[in-house]
Image (cartoon, rainbow, N blue to C red):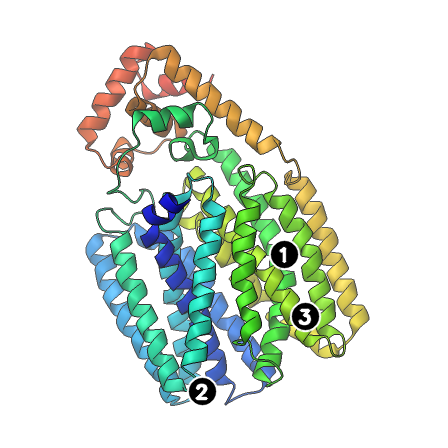
Amino acid sequence: MTASLKTHAWELMALALFYFVFLGGEYFFDATLAGFMSPADVVLNQGMILGASAAGFCCFEPFSRTPRRVRLGCSIVSMVVGFGGIAVLFAQPSLLLMQVIGVICFYLLGVLGGAVHWAASRKIAGFDHAALLVGIAYAAGIAMQFVANAAFSDRLAASIALAVGAAALLVVCRRCFAGGRCDGATRVSGGPMPNERDVRDKLSGKNVSNALGARATCPSASLRGALWLSVIVALVSLMFVTLDNIVTLADAGGDLDVGSWPRLLLAISAIAAGALFDIRQRRYMNFIMFCVLLLSTIAILAAETSGGLFCGLVLFYLASGFFVTYFTASFMLMAPKTRRPALWAGMGRAINNICAFAITGPSLALIQTGSIVLMIAVCIVLFVAIIVVFFASGAFRLDAALEEEARSAVDLGAFVEEYGLTPREAEVLVLVTADERALKEIASEMDISLRMLQKHLTSIYKKTDTQTRAGLTKKFLT
């Protein structure tokens, strides 16, 4: 575990700094607008910037495919706009300008978040403690935000701390992508290729969930899994967004301080979630998350009960840490198995923010009714829907996914052993049979020349007695 932290320190640091800047920027934006509008309007504006960030997450994948010079120019412009946005929020020139700046800055932050999640996904997806690494990164971001809020109480110091965090995030992101291309179809290169023993371990099922970049999984099956996971995260987000709006409403009204010590429970629960999720290669991850939903339901009802606001806040933080770790780790682990990993790596955060944007108005109206009976009815409906989706998606079949992946790994291992393929040829085999991408694109992903890839492929053809890529694919899959 210590080796994993050391190996992936830059990616973990990038994730932690992203959470610090994102959550700190959201807090700073809400606190700034609180002096201009009612608490209910602050909640609505928070939903607006979260929707903008979701759009940014979704736009990272096509942006990553633009020429390097275009990306560099856009990055410089984004940096100037981001720092200028912090200055505008501090100066408070007008309400409309602050709202526009908030939307633009969070859109850009979403694009950057997509890059951070994609880079981290390609680096940690092959580790048994991947969920714990995500939990640690989130906990570090929360801890930095808590320290910043406690140390810098005035707005000038808070804005400077936010700007420093944003600058550090850009520096770390540049380091994460150093030596490799930021391309939605490629991986972060620059690290050592797996040696023969590593590949043999993967082929024998020791780390089957991400063997050779998880390209052995059927793309259509991966897409179905990603869509089911999206539905699950969306339904759970509806519940958590409602509770988050209760907390934001109370904070904007002065009844709560979201920067107080209970916020550290987010960090504690995130680390605990990562440790629990990683048990037996995340076999019980969905079941544990489902149990935590019971806690979140109780939190919503407790927050609406007279005198139970602080209790609801504590329960919310405990449950929220589990949920954030769940959707972040789930999509980051699944992304390399899909054809568009740069899109899916940060989709957990994007879906959560989309739901926040879509449900803010209705949930705010529900909260303001003050009807406990109506709140209970909505929670029951959501909970029943979540149960149905969990069962329909097969999330409760604890062994099914692992058994399917184990069979794929065994079949791959048997094929490699039968035809005497080298570890490098095994990697080429998985990539060229996974989809119909051009060889040039696959060579870029492997960080080798097209000529070298063709040399490996020719050797594979000779060993397997095939002559074309289609023939090789058919023989491998059957």
- Asked if disc 3 and disc 1 are in contact, CB closer than 8 Å, the reply is no
Between 387 and 264, the one lying in front of the other is: 264
Residue, x 61% and y 50% (percent of image)?
232
Q: Mark 2 falls on what kind of element?
A: helix
- Asked if disc 2 and disc 3 are in contact, CB closer than 8 Å, the reply is no
Can you see residue 165? yes
Residue 317 at x, y percent in the picture:
59, 65
**Mark 2 vs mark 3: which is more N-terminal?**
2
**Residue 218 to residue 184: above or below:** above
**Mark 2 vs mark 1: which is more N-terminal?**
2
Residue type, mark 2 in image: Leu
Residue, x 43% and y 29% (percent of image)?
216
Q: Would you name the residue on which mark 1 appears?
A: 236
Kindly indicate the quadrant of the structure image that contains residue 245.
bottom right
Q: Would you name the residue on which mark 2 appears?
A: 95
Estimate the spatial distance between the alpha carbons at disc 2 and disc 1, rounded to whole Å.
33 Å
**Residue 91 to residue 335: above or below:** below
Q: Would you name the residue on which mark 3 appears?
A: 312
Q: In this figure, what is the number of numbered marks?
A: 3
**Mark 3 vs mark 1: which is more N-terminal?**
1
